[in-house]
Structure formats: structure tokens, C-alpha cells
């Protein structure tokens, strides 16, 4: 029945954020991420936020108008729309770390999501029922059911999860604490 499916699907998908954030925190604690402490700075100025938001809305419009060609925009558009909103509302944001050139939280999130994605695809491969992918233009060279280029979608997906988390927790009262050390105050936990 539909209610049972909705409950089971909700339970299954409720593990996505904790899995990605926990894996990202584990990766972020490794020495490997130290190399990303000093990188390009992206200050969340009004112009940057406006451009991010405009790009996100444009990507979403293109996706809705021509989904066959612009389907990859599904992942990045959400982050580009929500992250500027978080900054303007005073919620936590990955942009605080990027403003100081600290890319460790973003890299850890993306790597954590790739690790989780690999296992999700592996578990899906022999399961019944399972999902399959019909990806225009890049549906070849699969690792499990996912085309290899499809794994790139996990990178912006991780940033979107974090932005959505910050938006929701911010609406419930969690504000930006001003922490710039990415891992003394985990970015998405």
C-alpha cells in the first residue's frame, strides 16, 4: 500500500544525511584533508551571492524547460539557490570557510558523499527491486548500475545536503556561530 511504501521510503532516505555527514566528518579528521586548508578564497559578498542565486535559478529554469539536455543542473542548482539564502538569513554556511580559503569542509563533504554513493550503488546492484539509470549521452562505462560520470553528481549533492541542513536548522533557530575552524565545529552537524 502507498502508506507503507511512503513510510519505508522515508525511513530509507532519512539515513542519507547522517551517512554523508558522518563519513565526511571521518574523512575530515584525516591528515589527507589538511592540504585543503589554504585554497582560493570565495568571499560571500553581495555580488557573489547574487551571481550564485541567479546561476541557480537559471540552471533550474533550463532544467525544467529542456530536461533532456540540462539534467545535470538538477544537482548544482539547489545548492546555488539555497546557499546564498543561508548567508543572507544568518544561517551557517560553507561559504564562511571558503571566504577564509579553507576548503576542508567542502572537500570532506564531497569525498564523504562519493564514498557513500559508491556503497549505495554497490548495494543497489544486486538488490530487488533496484533502480537503474537511463542517462542521456553518458550512460556508458558503468560501475554497478551507475555510469561513471554519474558519480560526479554526488559532489554537488553533498553541498546541497549541507545547505538544506543549514536552511532547516537555521529556520529552527540555529544561527551562524562564526566558527571558521571547519572541524572544531563540524559544518553540517
Image (tube, rainbow, N blue to C red):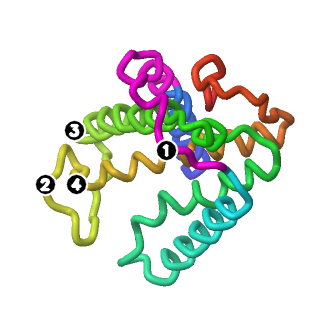
The residue where tag 1 is placed is 40
What separation in Å lies between label 3 and label 1 (alpha carbons)? Answer: 42 Å
Which residue occupies 55% across, 34% down?
17
Within 10 Å of disc 1 (Cα), the crowding (few <14, some 14-19, many 20+) is few
What separation in Å lies between label 3 and label 4 (alpha carbons)? Answer: 16 Å
Q: Which residues are magenta?
A: 22-43
Which residue occupies 74% across, 48% down?
87
146 and 6: which is toward the camera: 146
Q: Earlier in the sequence, mark 2 or mark 4?
A: 2
Q: Earlier in the sequence, mark 2 or mark 3?
A: 3
- Give the SS element for disc 4: strand
38 and 19: which is toward the camera: 38
Q: Is residue 103 left or right of residue 188?
A: left
Q: Are marks 2 and 4 in contact (CB under 8 Å)?
A: yes
Q: Are marks 1 and 4 in contact (CB under 8 Å)?
A: no
The residue where tag 2 is placed is 141
Q: Nearer the viewer, mark 1 or mark 4?
A: 1
Amino acid at each position: 500500500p502507498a502508506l507503507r511504501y511512503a513510510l519505508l521510503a522515508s525511513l530509507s532516505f532519512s539515513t542519507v544525511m547522517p551517512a554523508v555527514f558522518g563519513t565526511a566528518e571521518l574523512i575530515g579528521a584525516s591528515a589527507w584533508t589538511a592540504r585543503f586548508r589554504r585554497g582560493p578564497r570565495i568571499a560571500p559578498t553581495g555580488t557573489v551571492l547574487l551571481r550564485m542565486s541567479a546561476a541557480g535559478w537559471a540552471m533550474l529554469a533550463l532544467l525544467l524547460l529542456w530536461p533532456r539536455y540540462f539534467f545535470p543542473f538538477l544537482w548544482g542548482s539547489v545548492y546555488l539557490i539555497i546557499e546564498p539564502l543561508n548567508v543572507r538569513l544568518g544561517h551557517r554556511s560553507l561559504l564562511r570557510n571558503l571566504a577564509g580559503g579553507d576548503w576542508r569542509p567542502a572537500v570532506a563533504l564531497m569525498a564523504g558523499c562519493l564514498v557513500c554513493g559508491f556503497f549505495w550503488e554497490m548495494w543497489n546492484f544486486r538488490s530487488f527491486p533496484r533502480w537503474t539509470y537511463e542517462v542521456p549521452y553518458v550512460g556508458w562505462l558503468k560501475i554497478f548500475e551507475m555510469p561513471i560520470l554519474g558519480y560526479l553528481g554526488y559532489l554537488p549533492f553533498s553541498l546541497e545536503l549541507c545547505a538544506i541542513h543549514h536552511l532547516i536548522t537555521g529556520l529552527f533557530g540555529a544561527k551562524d556561530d562564526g566558527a571558521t575552524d571547519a572541524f572544531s565545529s563540524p559544518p553540517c552537524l
